[in-house]
Image (cartoon, rainbow, N blue to C red):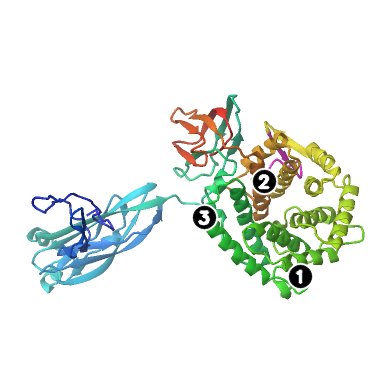
Amino acid sequence: RTFFPETWVWHCLNVSSETGQAELRLDVPDSITTWVTEAVGLSEEKGLGLARRAELRTFKPFFVDFTLPYSLIRGEQTKVPLTVYNYLPTCAEVSPRTLGVVASKQGQRKKCVPPGEATPTSIVFSVTELGPANITARAIAYSEPSCCSDEFQAAKSSNDVEERRTAIGMDYVRRTVLVEPEGLPREYTYSVFFCPNDENHNEAFTLGVPHNIVPGSERATAFMIGDVMGPTLNNLDKLLRLPFGCGEQNMIHFAPNVFVLKYLQKTRQLSPDVENEATDYLLQGYQRQLTYKRQDGSYSAFGERDSSGSMWLTAFVLKSFAQSRGFIFIDPEELRAAKSWLITHQQSDGSFPAMGRILNKDLQGGIHGKISLTAYVLAALLETGIATEEEKVAVAKAKDFLESNTYSAEDPYTTALSAYALALLRSPYAPLALRRLNHMAITQGTATRTVSSPQPSVVSAEVEMTAYGLLTYTLLGDVASALPVVKWLSQQRNSLGGFLFSPQDTCVALQALSEYAILSYVGGVNLTISLASTNLDFQESFELNRDNKKLLQSARIPSIPTGLFVSAKGEGCCLMQV
């Protein structure tokens, strides 16, 4: 038995006007159940008619049933419960068997099932091949002598018992289970963003595998989409999340919702369903965050239970709340109180000191020292809006501090954050800070990134500081210079549209990419892309145009390791991920 549909018939047919009858021939499913049939008739003359319910009972006097888990691990022994139902007038000797897998002798022990009863047993097996596997269970009922009688038990070991008995009931049930590889899953993403603009774009790269890979577990898929924010938009269910946790965790889940909503709204792609879901998350996150507000207007991981408010977290809350005002109601008093607390603790030289504790240092990103923290707080104040004279004075003092320390910032993270804050102020020092940042950048082909050390590996701070550089370019309206930065950031994305390292770099990078996408958004895309492997076992073409540029197209690469060659021609841009 292999046919077990949840719904059997969903069919439309014409009824003869002469006989008033219609005939539909179907194969009865293998399920042991009662099917309830409902019929609705529609006629131009008679209107709507409802038929009486009819029931069909499908039954076997001897059958077996078992349920498999969603997936199994290759090579591991699995014990699956199995039940034998015997409605025959004779006892049934059951010896469960499995076909298509490596069965354990433990699961082949014989059981006796009396007439009219159901007896639980089990099958034990392991699977050696990856992918979908068919597991077939078999049970047989024998005639007299009864397997449950004393006579049979005494002669059970005799071979002539098997010869004198006849099978009077038999059932085979086949179900499918997914077999997954042993070991721990690891995902590697290669991303590239290119804009041919009527020129041929050609690129070759190699898809390798780690030396300790589980044989047979490797797989690769290529994705194409005509939007730099495409992977994010196609994984909204993964990135739009209900905020939870302490004051720090709550905001890390709150912020991406804002940036995604802002991008969709600005590019007129925001659907009612996505808007309702995301705004509901924002409302719940906003209400939860207020529970971590202290009486002095600041925020910390655990509110009043902490000894003081956190300078960084209060600024992060302030900018996130301010950016969400276009989607949910934010009490202006909450923003005013947070700004007042920040300004109250500003130093005489215009800087903002580090206050309070940060439980998860990764959330803070690369912020360390007075200059970077001052730039971060200043950016938060500016993104929120400056209204009172006190706020204007505080911003002016912070601006003087950053401008006077433009050459004092020796690390690229501080330089990137300072450049962004100064660009928000339209300061003449912003281009200078950006030039200093560019001197620290590394250009790889047509992609540009900034690095915090000579180490070759990419770290979270590099993603974050490069994103601040992109934000600065977008504020200055320099789309051409921003493109190499976008290309490098795109290469660091994971398959869900986020980034590879920490929640904080995902927040800043999504903000930067969404601002760039809004600035550079064009409706027209007309690209022809060819992708081929050096193994000569894969070749695929993709067409991107105005109608399908938001559609994530995919193609499975049959074998790796291999080399891939991509060629593109036409107008517009494409983000490719493998």
Mark before the other along the chain sequence, 3 or 1: 3
Question: Can you give x and y, in whole percent of width and height, for residue 164 in the image?
Answer: 7, 60
Does residue 479 appear to the left or right of 188 in the view shown? right
Closer to the chain start, of discs 2 and 3, is 3
Asked if residue 221 is positioned above or below residue 167 in the image, the reply reads above
| Residue stretch in magenta | 447-458
Mark 3 vs mark 1, foreground winner is 3
Q: Label 2 to label 3, Cα distance in Å?
A: 22 Å
Amino acid carrying label 1: it is: Gly
Q: Do the residues labelled 2 and 3 touch (CB within 8 Å)?
A: no
Q: Depth check: 487 or 142 in front?
A: 487
| Mark 3 crowd level (few <14, some 14–19, many ≥20, 10 Å Cα) | few
Residue 250 occupies which quadrant of the picture? Answer: bottom right
**Disc 2: which residue:** 515
Gap between marks 1 and 2 measured at Cα: 30 Å
1 or 2: tag closer to the N-terminus: 1
x then y, percent, for residue 526: 53, 31
**Neighbour class for label 1 at 10 Å: few (<14), some, many (≥20)?**
many
Residue with the mark numbered 1: 297
The amino acid beneath tag 3 is Pro
Q: Which residue is drawn at 59% across and 25% down?
A: 198
Q: Where's the N terminus, which quadrant? A: bottom left
Residue at 45% in and 27% down: 536
Q: Is residue 457 covered in magenta?
A: yes
Q: Is mark 2 on a helix, strand or loop?
A: helix
Q: Is residue 331 above or below residue 520?
A: below
- Which residue lies under the disc numbered 3? 272
* Number of numbered discs visible in the structure rendering: 3
Identify which amino acid the numbered label 2 is placed on.
Answer: Glu
Name the element at disc 3.
helix
